[in-house]
Amino acid sequence: MTTHPDSAATPKRFTIPIGPQHPALKEPGFFEFTVEGETVIGATLRLGYAHRGIEKAVVSRTWVQNLYLLERVCGICSHIHSLAYCLGVEKLAGVTPPPRAQAIRVLIAELERMHSHLLWLGVAAHDAGFETLFMYSWRDRETILDLFEQISGNRVNHSINTLGGVKFDLTAEQIVSVLKAVELMEERARYYLDLVRNDPMLGQRIRGIGTMSAAEAHRMGVVGPTARASGVGRDLRVEAPYAAYTAIPVVVMLETDGDLQARFIVRIREMFESCRIIRVLLDHLPEGDLQARMPRRIPEGETIARVEAPRGELFYFIKSNGADMPERIKLRTPTLCNLGSVLALCIGRQLADIPMLLIGTDPCFSCNDRAVVIHQAGNREKWTWEQFRRYGNEALR
Amino acid sequence: MTAMKIEQAWNNALAGVALWARTNSPWVLHFNTGSCNGCDIELLAALTPRYDVERLGVKLQASPRQADILICTGPITRQARDRLLRIYEQMPEPRFVIALGSCALSCGVFHDCYNVVGPLDRFIPVDVYVPGCPPRPEAIIYGVIELLKKLHPVDVILEGGSA
Amino acid sequence: MNAVETALQTALEHLAPLNGQVTTPEDGRRDVTINAGDLLEGARLLLDSGWGYLTAITGLDHGESEGVLEVLVHFCAGAAVLTLRIRLARAGGELASLCVLIPAASVFEREISEMFGVTFSGSPDTRRLFLPDEWPEGVYPLLKESPAAAGEA
């Protein structure tokens, strides 16, 4: 239960504000914790630094213009946002994208999942005090960004989706590049998995930290790798398959320890699965068109599109009143889901546990935007995220 | 292959600049004013081994009081604006500003959103604008070098050319 | 009947005591329009039987002419989506907070409150989530008549 920090203060309770500058992630945010001694008794958050007002903006843009806006909700998971949007609008229009387009969409989605997981790996490693791991994983990430650039012309915000299909095809040369990259990714994932499972120093920082049980994850409505690390097997690619996932069975990666180490392991194992999916996809790449015709005015109706973003379930509600601009688009990102849940989970825990618990959810701040404050006994101490995570690390020694 | 040639010319160019830049090494503060993170991750990528901007002597700082250059991403949301102004005030002179990405330049696709009050040069003077959505690491580094050239007008000969 | 339809039928059975109006907006979804006062009970009927999880809450303003604001509370079990729909007046609408059942609902409720002006009674945290502190009181951005652009800084 989140508690307003000004409610019923007892002695020895102080507030630690953290943010809005988060040196590792370079993302703004604002969390607030109330502690008694070392135990967290209240946790809430205040977002807004990256709040731009997108849900208002969409109703004054055409369906095609919104594609370019929604791609930019988040630079890390740009494709999955535009995919959810396209799937929803195509459903309203009764249009089915051609099979080749569906396959290319999944290819990019899985490449995006890998780049996102590598990004998180680096950032989480940095936060656990492992600068080298940050450098390695971000260097490996470049291989995937190269592929995005080859296929779409851009490393980030690759804009591959269009309403009705995709804009870019895969050439034979690009397919060879993808397969080579996939081989490299598997090699690197093996290295990271070994490191995360067996390196004693890293283990000290991540084993038994920020643990969430399956029951807690289930009850709190946690999604994505964060849930899967606690044994809750939610994955929309399996539960509610979309695009080419209907033809490719996905194996859900589950761990049961539910600690930070399990969250590392799930994401690295998902990379193996992404590689496998990509190989299967390219082995059976359908021939044919890249786009189906879409009407300019989308028929009246309401639709919900749910997709498995790298961080978990991404939810889009789209309503059309038959015009060439949407009536309403509501988007709920996986991070909002998980943050709300994880904060509720902080109650009763040690403060030192919290930084890595938060990091373990792979919070994408631009998808939401957040920060941290801690209250203790009428004292209001201001910490930066850097101080907060160092506090977490030092308490482990 | 074309990709190899470009990288080599780029590396030659950087090598020519590196020595000069290292003697004037700028400390850079990064501030996100509500960006989608696209620009931020390309800026961070500039620090990683492939681009390795630290060999130019460029160092990412956490504190405004020690920064020479402020690099801003994002279209400036209301909440970010106040913090932006405070950070800029805390920076000792001489201080310089790079606007990174379409949003910092013009608010980009968010130009008419209710919580967006930018662009950057509406609030603080900007020395270098780096366009792109997002700009790639090479473009960011180029922007930093352009700023350095402004600060230290030295004849820098960039060796380009054959692989 | 496939698994998704079965799941939806089960949810409808759980919700039967509320006598809501059931519609099928698309495959894999059921909408149940219920009275505002029945929201907490509806959530409890679903969650106590282990049906799904709360995935999102959508606010939908139908505008001045219709004079109605709808709050859509979405629950999901696998591919099945069950939405509780509540019709409220466009101003002064009030619902019971779901936080007593689902602590994580707080972030969803706070967003609806600040964007549409709906109050969630019994909510542990009623502060703004996304909007800045200086945002004027009583201006709810996602109501249709609210201005679109930022205006003067």
Image (tube, coloured by chain):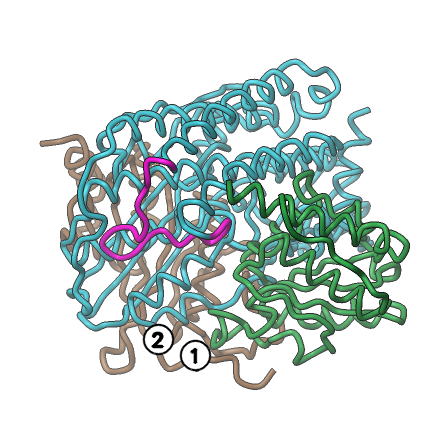
Which label sits on residue C148? 1
Q: Are marks 2 and 1 in contact (CB under 8 Å)?
A: yes
In the picture provided, is A261 more to the left or to the right than A201?
left
The part of the chain drawn in magenta is A154-173
Chain appearing in brown on the rendered image: C
Chain corresponding to green in the figure: B
| Colour chosen for chain A | cyan
Residue at position x 50%, y 46% in the image: A335
Residue A61 in percent (x, y) is at 34, 72
Question: Identity of the amino acid at label 2?
Answer: Ser
Q: Secondary structure at mark 2?
A: helix
Q: Residues within 10 Å of mark 1 (few under 14, many from 20)?
A: some
Instruction: Determine whether C146 is above or below A379 in the image.
Output: below
The picture places residue A309, in percent across and down from the top left corner, at 42, 42
Q: Which mark is residue A60?
A: 2
Q: Is residue A162 magenta?
A: yes
Do the dots labelled 2 and 1 sit on one chain? no
